[in-house]
């Protein structure tokens, strides 16, 4: 029984260290964890401040959650805005999402030139299936439209570089 104060002290010290470790945790990782637990309203509340502060991955995540109605009412128009912010920071998944939106003509006019350009950017950024979508979209382009798409890609790459 004379070791009880020492054990209490050790327990309090460990508890304090655990609290400190949690306090210094990565807010993005915390939000991803909550998202993985399917608590979408809470995850969205955690991602939005990060996205507003310019976190490129949080911007994409907010766009995806809003598009799918996870934790909020779905809004492709709002999702589009978040995808564009993430795209300006080089997020290949955001390029791909924008390509799909232009390919389907949702929220924006259907535009095979823009769709091709976004899919090309996504592919160049390493997106796993963007090449398949790029080939599909290229079949929709008129011969004179391909150079226009390539100019969009070149301008985008020069203007917005990945951090």
Image (cartoon, helix red, strand yellow):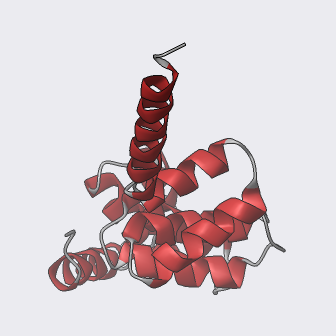
- Asked if residue 113 is positioned above or below residue 36 in the image, the reply reads below
Outermost residue to the front: 2
**Residue in the picture at 52% in, 21% down:** 4
Residue 85 visible? The answer is: yes
Q: Residue at x 84, y 74 (%)?
A: 73
Q: Is residue 107 above or below residue 132?
A: below
Left or right of residue 75: residue 61: left
116 left or right, relative to 71: left
**Where on the picture, by quarter, is residue 156?**
bottom left
Of 47 and 140, nearer the camera is: 47
Q: Is residue 110 above or below residue 4?
A: below
Q: Quadrant of residue 148?
A: bottom left
Residue in front for this viewpoint, 141 or 85: 85
Foreground residue, 132 or 107? 107
Residue 85 at what x, y percent from top left?
43, 81
In the rendered image, the quadrant that contains the N terminus is top right
Direction from residue 1 to residue 138 in the image, left or right:
left
| Nearest the eye: 121 or 85 | 85
Q: Quadrant of the C terminus?
A: bottom left
């Amino acid at each position: 029984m004379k070791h009880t104060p020492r054990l209490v002290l050790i327990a309090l010290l460990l508890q304090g260290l655990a609290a400190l470790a949690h306090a210094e945790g990565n807010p993005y990782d915390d939000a991803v964890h909550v998202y993985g637990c399917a608590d979408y309203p809470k995850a969205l509340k955690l991602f939005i401040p990060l996205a507003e502060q310019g976190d490129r991955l949080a911007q994409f995540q907010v766009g995806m959650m809003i598009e799918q109605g996870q934790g909020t009412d779905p809004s492709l128009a709002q999702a589009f805005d978040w995808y564009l912010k993430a795209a300006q920071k080089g997020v290949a998944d955001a390029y791909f999402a924008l390509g799909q939106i232009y390919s389907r003509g949702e929220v924006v006019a259907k535009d095979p030139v823009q769709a091709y350009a976004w899919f090309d950017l996504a592919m160049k950024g390493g997106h796993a299936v963007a090449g398949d979508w790029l080939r599909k979209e290229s079949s929709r382009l008129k011969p004179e439209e391909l150079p226009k798409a390539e100019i969009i890609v070149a301008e985008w790459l020069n203007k917005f570089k990945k951090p």
